C-alpha cells in the first residue's frame, strides 16, 4: 500500500515513514502543503496522512482542492489543534478520519489500514481467496493451514493484488502502489516479484490463484481466467 | 443589619442629625422671639397704665388729688387680680389699687429687667401680694412741685402659662417634624441607593462566561456612569488578560503536542521489533533533541508569562540611564561579535532616562544585539543608535545580516515563532517574543524593518522619564 505523509515536522515525518515502511507500506513524504498537493494529485496513493498546520498551504485548503478535483483517496488528518470546530470542518471537507496529536502509532496504523480497507470495499482485515488467506493486520499469509513466508516487498505485491482481487491490475499500477516516486527501479522488477510470489503461493497447489492477463497485467482470483 | 458600615444608614444619620440641630435652633429662636414679644406687649400695657395713673393725679386748689375713674380701673378693683398700682407723692403712699385688698405692694426687686434714667423709668420682676411673680414698672416724676412715683404691676402668671403652652406646642411640633424627617430620610437614603443595588445586580450577572457584557454607562446616573466606565475598563483588562491566558494555553498545547508526538512515535515504532543498537541510538538522539526543544519551549513560555504577569506588579522599576543599559547589553555580546569578526558601532545620546526594570531591559537589548550578531554575515556590522523622539526614547539596532522575509516579519514576535533557518543556529536567547513582552511591560513598542539580503533594523521606543 502506498501512503503519502504531509507533515512539516521532519523528525515526526521521518519516523512515521520508517514505522509505516516496516508495516509493508510504501511511503512518500511532503514537508509543505504545496508539495503535498502536487504529489497527491499526480501520483496514486492508497491513503494520505495530512497535518493541518503546514507551511505554504494549510491542510484544510489542500484537502478542499483535492476533493474538488475528484480525488477520493482516503485522507486522515493529524492535528495538534484543540477544539471540535476543526474536527467538524475537516470531516465536512472530506477527511476520512481525524487523529489528534499526540497519538499512539499502533492506533494510527490501524486507522490508516481501516480507512484503506473501507475505500477498497473490503471491511474485513482478513482477505480470503479460495484457500488463501491474508491477514492484513498481522501480515500473515496462509494457504491450507500452512504459513507462507514472504519478504516485505513480496507481501506488498500480494496485499495490493488481494485488495484488488478479481480485478486486473496493470504492471504500471503495481509499480505505482508498491514503490515510492524516488525509487529507481528495473523494468523487469514486477515480473521478478510475481514469479517469486507464484513459486511461494501457487506452486505447491493444484488451483492457481495468480494469473497473467496478457497485455493487461495480473489478477488474483479463484475464478477461471482466459488466456492462462 | 451587619456590623459593616452602611452608606445608607450613615447618610440617614447625618441627615437626621443636621435636621435635629436645625430644628432645635429654630425652636429656640422662635421661643425667645415669642417670649420677647409677649414681654414687650406686657411692658406696653404697663406703660399705658402708668400713663393713665399719672394722668389721674391732678391739682385742685393747690392740693393734689387722685381721681378714680371706673373705666381705667377694671382689673385693678378685683382683689388679688394680679393687676396692682401704687402712687407715691412726696415719698408717701398717696393712692393704691383696691385689688391690693389692704396688702402693701412694696415690690422687692428680684431681677431688674431694664432702666431708662432719661424717663426715670425702670422695669423689674418681683413677688406680688399673692406670692405670684409680677412685672413691675416704676416711674418717678415731679408733678406740681411734688416728687411723685407711680408703680404699676402685672402678674406674670398668665404670661408664663402662655409660654408654657407654647413650649409644649413647640415640642409637639418638633417631635412630629423629627418623625417626618426620619421617615423621609429613610426613604431618601433607601431610594438614592437603589441605582447602586441595580448596578450590583447587573455586575453579578457578569461571569467569566459573559465577560463580553458591559455596564450600560449612558443609562446610569452621573455618579454611577463614572463607576460603570471604571468597571467596564476593568472588564476590558480582565477580558484581555483572560484571552491572553487562553491563547497561551492553546499555544502551549499546540507547541507541546507536536514534540510529544515525535517522542511517542519514536518509542512506538522503534519498539515494534528488535533492532541493531545503532538504530536505537539514532532514535534516542532524536528523542533527546526533541526533549531539548520541549525544554526550551517551556522555558520561553514561563519567561513570557512571568514577564507579562509579574514585571509591572513587581515594583522593581527604577529611573535608569538608557546609555548605561545599552553599554551593559553590548558587553554581553562583545565576545560573540569578536569571534565572528563583527564590528559594533554606536551613536548613543547621553542623558536619556527611562523608568524600568534594569535587568529585564538589559536582557531585552542583549537579546536583540545577540540576534543582530548571530544572524549577521561574517565581518558585518551592528550599529546601535539611541536618540530622543519627542517624549520618547528610540533605540535602533541595525545589522548587515540576511534580513527577514516580509511574510515572516509580522510573526517573529510571536511567542513560539522560530524563523526558517533559525534552527540551524544554536539558540541560547529566549526569543523575540520575550523581548516584545519586556518592552511592552515598559509601555514601549518594538518594530522591525528589514530588507532581505541587506539587513534588519529593530526599533525600540520607550517613554522618557525624569525630564
Image (cartoon, coloured by chain):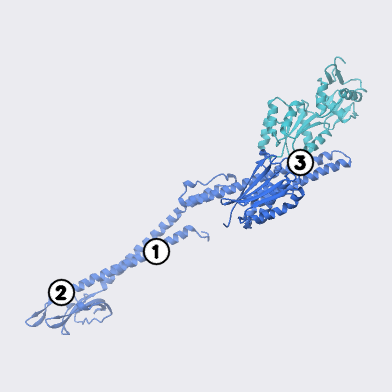
Chain colours: A cyan, B blue
Residue B127 sits in quarter = bottom left
Q: Give the label, 2 or 3, closer to the camera.
A: 3
Secondary structure at numbered mark 1? helix
Query: Label 1 near label 3: C-beta < 8 Å?
Result: no
Q: Position of residue A31 (x, y in %)?
A: 75, 35
**Label disc, if present, on residue B261 of the rendered structure:** 3
Does label 2 or label 3 sit earlier along the sequence?
Answer: 2
Q: Position of residue B248 (x, y in %)?
A: 66, 46
**Label disc, if present, on residue B20 of the rendered structure:** 1
Q: Check the image and report above or below for B34 versus B206.
A: below
Does label 3 or label 1 sit earlier along the sequence?
Answer: 1
Query: Which of the two residues, B334 or A207, is positioned nearer the viewer here?
Result: B334
Tell me which chain the residue with mark 1 is part of.
B
**Label disc, if present, on residue B52 of the rendered structure:** 2
Does label 2 or label 1 sit earlier along the sequence?
Answer: 1
Secondary structure at numbered mark 2? helix
| Residue at 18% over, 75% down | B50
Q: Real-space Cα distance between discs 3 and 1?
A: 80 Å
Residue reaching furthest left?
B61
Amino acid at each position: 500500500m502506498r501512503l503519502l505523509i504531509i507533515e512539516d515536522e521532519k523528525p515526526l515525518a521521518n519516523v512515521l515513514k520508517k514505522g509505516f515502511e516496516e508495516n509493508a507500506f510504501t511511503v512518500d513524504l511532503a514537508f509543505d502543503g504545496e508539495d503535498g498537493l502536487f504529489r497527491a494529485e499526480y501520483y496514486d496513493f492508497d491513503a494520505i496522512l495530512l497535518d493541518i498546520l503546514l507551511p505554504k498551504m494549510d491542510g484544510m485548503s489542500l484537502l478542499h482542492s483535492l476533493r474538488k478535483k475528484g480525488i477520493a483517496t482516503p485522507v486522515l488528518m493529524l492535528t495538534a489543534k484543540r477544539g471540535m470546530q476543526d474536527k467538524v470542518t475537516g470531516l465536512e471537507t472530506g477527511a476520512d478520519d481525524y487523529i489528534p496529536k499526540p497519538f499512539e502509532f499502533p492506533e494510527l496504523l490501524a486507522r490508516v489500514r481501516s480507512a484503506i480497507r473501507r475505500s477498497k470495499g473490503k471491511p474485513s482485515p482478513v482477505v480470503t481467496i479460495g484457500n488463501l488467506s491474508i491477514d492484513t493486520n498481522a501480515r500473515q499469509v496462509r494457504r491450507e493451514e500452512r504459513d507462507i513466508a514472504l519478504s516485505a516487498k513480496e507481501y506488498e505485491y500480494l496485499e495490493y493484488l488481494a485488495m484488488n482481487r478479481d480485478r486486473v491490475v496493470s504492471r504500471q499500477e503495481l509499480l505505482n502502489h508498491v514503490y515510492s516516486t524516488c525509487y529507481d527501479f528495473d523494468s523487469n522488477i514486477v515480473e521478478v516479484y510475481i514469479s517469486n510470489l507464484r513459486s511461494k503461493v501457487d506452486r505447491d497447489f493444484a488451483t492457481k490463484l495468480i494469473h497473467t492477463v496478457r497485455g493487461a497485467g495480473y489478477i488474483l482470483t479463484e475464478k477461471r481466467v482466459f488466456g492462462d | 443589619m451587619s456590623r459593616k458600615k452602611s452608606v445608607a444608614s450613615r447618610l440617614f444619620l447625618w441627615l437626621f442629625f443636621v435636621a435635629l440641630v436645625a430644628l432645635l435652633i429654630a425652636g429656640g429662636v422662635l421661643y425667645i422671639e415669642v417670649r420677647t414679644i409677649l414681654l414687650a406687649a406686657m411692658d406696653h400695657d404697663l406703660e399705658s397704665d402708668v400713663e393713665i395713673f399719672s394722668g389721674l393725679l391732678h391739682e385742685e386748689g393747690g392740693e393734689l388729688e387722685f381721681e378714680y375713674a371706673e373705666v381705667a380701673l377694671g382689673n385693678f378693683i378685683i382683689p388679688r387680680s394680679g393687676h396692682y398700682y401704687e402712687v407715691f407723692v412726696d415719698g408717701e403712699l398717696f393712692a393704691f389699687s383696691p385689688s391690693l385688698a389692704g396688702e402693701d405692694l412694696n415690690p422687692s426687686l428680684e431681677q431688674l429687667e431694664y432702666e431708662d434714667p432719661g424717663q426715670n423709668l425702670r422695669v423689674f420682676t418681683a413677688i406680688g401680694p399673692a406670692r405670684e411673680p409680677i412685672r413691675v414698672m416704676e416711674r418717678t416724676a415731679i408733678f406740681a412741685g411734688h416728687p411723685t412715683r407711680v408703680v404699676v404691676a402685672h402678674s406674670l402668671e398668665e404670661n408664663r402659662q402662655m409660654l408654657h403652652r407654647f413650649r409644649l406646642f413647640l415640642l409637639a411640633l418638633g417631635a412630629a417634624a423629627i418623625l417626618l424627617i426620619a421617615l423621609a430620610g429613610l426613604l431618601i437614603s433607601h431610594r438614592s441607593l437603589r441605582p447602586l443595588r441595580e448596578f450590583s445586580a447587573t455586575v453579578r450577572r457578569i461571569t467569566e462566561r459573559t465577560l463580553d457584557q458591559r455596564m450600560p454607562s449612558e443609562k446610569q446616573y452621573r455618579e454611577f456612569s463614572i463607576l460603570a466606565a471604571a468597571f467596564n475598563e476593568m472588564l476590558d483588562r480582565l477580558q484581555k488578560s483572560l484571552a491572553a491566558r487562553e491563547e497561551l494555553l492553546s499555544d502551549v498545547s499546540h507547541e507541546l503536542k507536536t514534540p510529544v508526538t515525535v517522542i511517542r512515535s519514536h518509542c512506538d515504532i522503534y519498539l515494534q521489533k528488535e533492532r541493531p543498537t545503532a538504530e536505537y541510538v539514532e532514535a534516542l538522539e532524536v528523542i533527546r533533541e526533541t526533549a531539548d526543544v520541549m525544554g526550551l519551549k517551556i522555558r520561553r513560555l514561563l519567561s513570557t508569562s512571568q514577564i507579562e504577569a509579574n514585571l509591572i506588579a513587581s515594583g522593581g522599576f527604577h529611573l535608569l540611564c538608557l546609555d548605561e543599559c545599552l553599554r551593559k547589553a553590548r558587553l554581553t555580546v562583545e565576545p560573540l561579535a569578536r569571534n565572528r569578526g563583527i564590528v559594533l558601532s554606536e551613536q548613543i545620546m547621553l542623558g536619556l532616562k527611562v523608568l524600568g526594570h534594569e535587568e529585564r531591559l538589559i536582557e531585552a537589548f542583549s537579546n536583540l544585539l545577540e540576534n543582530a550578531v548571530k544572524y549577521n554575515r561574517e565581518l558585518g556590522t551592528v550599529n546601535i543608535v539611541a536618540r530622543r523622539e519627542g517624549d520618547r526614547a528610540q533605540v535602533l539596532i541595525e545589522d548587515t545580516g540576511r534580513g527577514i522575509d516580509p511574510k515572516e516579519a509580522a510573526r517573529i514576535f510571536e511567542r513560539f515563532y522560530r524563523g526558517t533557518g533559525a534552527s540551524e543556529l544554536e539558540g541560547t536567547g529566549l526569543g523575540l517574543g520575550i523581548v516584545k513582552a519586556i518592552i511592552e511591560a515598559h509601555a514601549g513598542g518594538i518594530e522591525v524593518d528589514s530588507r532581505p539580503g541587506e539587513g534588519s533594523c529593530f526599533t525600540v521606543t520607550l517613554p522618557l522619564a525624569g525630564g
